[in-house]
Amino acid sequence: MSSPARHLPLSMSQRDIWLDQRSFPESPHLNVGGYGEIHGCVNLEFMAEAIRRIAAESETLRLIPTSASEQKLIAEPVVDIVELDFSNDANPDQSVLEFSQTAYSEPFSLEGRRPPWRVVLLKVGERKVGMMTQFHHIVMDGWGSWLFY
């Protein structure tokens, strides 16, 4: 049986970000993230498991901001890793770019249902895999999101 979530106050910086997002709830302007590629043989199942382990060990990736201007720290990570295959597209790199642009424009909900971050693994070719990450700025900054790689 997992432990209940701990409720924690937002830091001053998080509170500013929370207020900004509440002012513009449909806007993705506080999304940060990136895209990286691995050239070579990649086992997507192992990669997904590694991401799940990172989330289990990182409190930041288990924080869920709530509409009550606080955050919950959950004991067990909520990780849904999407795997997409663009390797058979006529121009896989262009397909990945178009997908990424659309995905980065999707705002996160700060209503306390799940941690505000996403990971998408993208098969670009037989020996080329991309990883797209997207975080809400309330749990990750731009510098920190690059450390994820």
Image: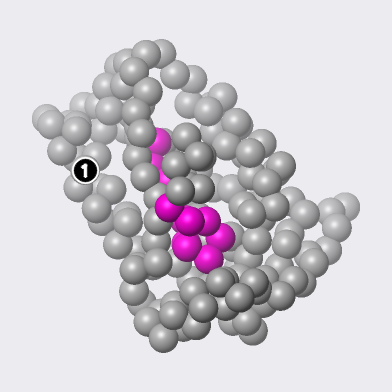
* Quarter of the image where one finds residue 64: bottom right
Position of 99 relative to 8 (above/below): above
* Quarter of the image where one finds residue 88: top left
Position of 61 relative to 20 (above/below): above
For residue 83, side relative to residue 9 (left or right): left
Nearer-the-camera pick, 118 or 1:
118
Please tell me whether residue 4 belongs to the stretch shown in magenta: no
**Is residue 53 at least partly visible in the picture?**
yes
Position of 6 relative to 140 (above/below): below
Residue in the image at 42% along x and 46% along y: 133
Nearer-the-camera pick, 82 or 105:
105
**Is residue 111 at least partly visible in the picture?**
no
For residue 141, side relative to residue 52 (left or right): left
Instruction: Please provide the residue range marked out in magenta.
Output: 131-142
Where residue 143 sits: x, y (%)?
45, 48
Assign a secondary structure to mark 1.
Answer: helix
Where residue 87 sits: x, y (%)?
25, 26
Residue in the image at 24% along x and 39% along y: 96
Judging by the rendered image, the residue that carries numbered circle 1 is 97
Residue in the image at 60% along x and 31% along y: 50
Dot 1 alpha-carbon crowd within 10 angstroms: few under 14, some 14 to 19, many 20 or more: few
For residue 64, side relative to residue 21 (left or right): right
The number of callouts visible is 1
Please tell me whether residue 135 belongs to the stretch shown in magenta: yes
Where residue 121 sits: x, y (%)?
41, 36
Please name the amino acid that badge 1 sits on. Leu
